[in-house]
Amino acid sequence: MTTNRLWRTLSGFNLSTRKWTQVNPRKARSQVPSNLLSLTSWNIDAFSPRAIARAKLILDHVLHESKPPDIIFLQEVTTAVRASLLQDAGVRGGYLVTDAEDQTAFENVPFATMTLLSRARFAFGSDSTEASEDDEVDGEGDLMIGRVSRMSLPSKYGRDALCVDLIKPAATGTSFRLINVHLDSLGHTLHYRAQQLEILANVLRESGCGGGIIAGDFNAISPEDEGLIDMNQLQDAWTALHGETGVEGATWGVGAKRRDGLGPGRLDKVAILGSKAEAMDVLRPGSIEVPRPGQESIFLPWSDHCGLSCSFTF
């Protein structure tokens, strides 16, 4: 099956020129082994009130952990939240961000995905879209950022997959692929989700790719969704580490009574090929005050989804 790829360069923010330009990310190098990576994925909820303030609370919570993650996947990012995120001092100082140069991915859709990569763990080559083992790298443990792409998927809602290739300088011709997803929503789009995951599993098996992870909002809302990861011969990181633990792994509908009768569900997942999950936790959101003119304020969770924290080796 053919795919439509849009290559992008990850960028840093240059305060002197006020433009999004490439900034040398090699100044700070982590001593953590390069085959151990940490990921946080969070659907930040585009539609509830105070979207920008809620996104900032989520981001601050993630960035101010004792050890901020190497990789951040965000889903349901609106154009307004994107602009706020790109101005955030913690993001500018610590991360390389996709879709920093333009809003192409946000056109004609209510929201999109974004991926953030730690400057301390990842480096550019001489050409960040064509990194190879011949690029100059400061230190043997560095991971090079290769190609970054958005892949169009069969979808009712215009969903795509945001892919980033990582290259170990010592591993000639082999990349490890990170795929940030927000699969189609609601029960009646199961056939789209099945197609989407099959395509993405095949992408992890492309020539030159040594595996990777697919993470984000899988919208696994129906019982039939539960078999899709196994069907595509991927490993579900949560069940590999925790088994089938029911509501303990739920990331949506937690502590909320819904009018549609749906209970808590594990809608957000991490699927793995060619790597090993080492640890995984569900991140519960805090709450934010929403003022209402002439009425008492209400308090809403930062998002209707919980986040996921996962570390893995490859």
Image (tube, rainbow, N blue to C red):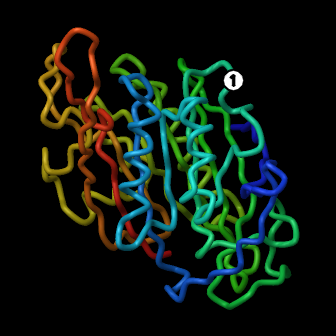
Q: Is residue 221 above or below residue 208?
A: above
Q: Is residue 11 above or below residue 51?
A: below
Observer-nearest residue: 170 or 52?
52
Seen as rendered, the residue at the extreme front is: 294
Q: Position of residue 186 (x, y in %)?
A: 36, 21
Q: Position of residue 291 (x, y in %)?
A: 28, 22
Observer-nearest residue: 68 or 287?
287
Residue picked out by circle 1: 107
Which quadrant does the N terminus fall into?
top right
Q: Is residue 91 above or below residue 138?
A: above
Left or right, 299 with reference to 312:
left
Seen as rendered, the residue at the extreme top is: 294
Left or right, 24 with reference to 283:
right
Q: Position of residue 110 (x, y in %)?
A: 55, 21
Left or right, 235 with reference to 264:
right
Q: Residue at x 66, y 18 (%)?
A: 108
Q: Residue at x 23, y 9 (%)?
A: 294
Q: Residues within 10 Å of mark 1 (few under 14, many from 20)?
A: few
Q: Position of residue 55 (x, y in %)?
A: 43, 40
Q: Quadrant of residue 216?
A: top left
Q: Residue at x 45, y 66 (%)?
A: 69
The amino acid type, in three-letter code, at marker 1 is Glu
Q: Please count the marks in the image.
A: 1
Observer-nearest residue: 292 or 171?
292
Instruction: Identify the secondary structure beneath mark 1.
Output: loop
Q: Residue at x 26, y 42 (%)?
A: 251
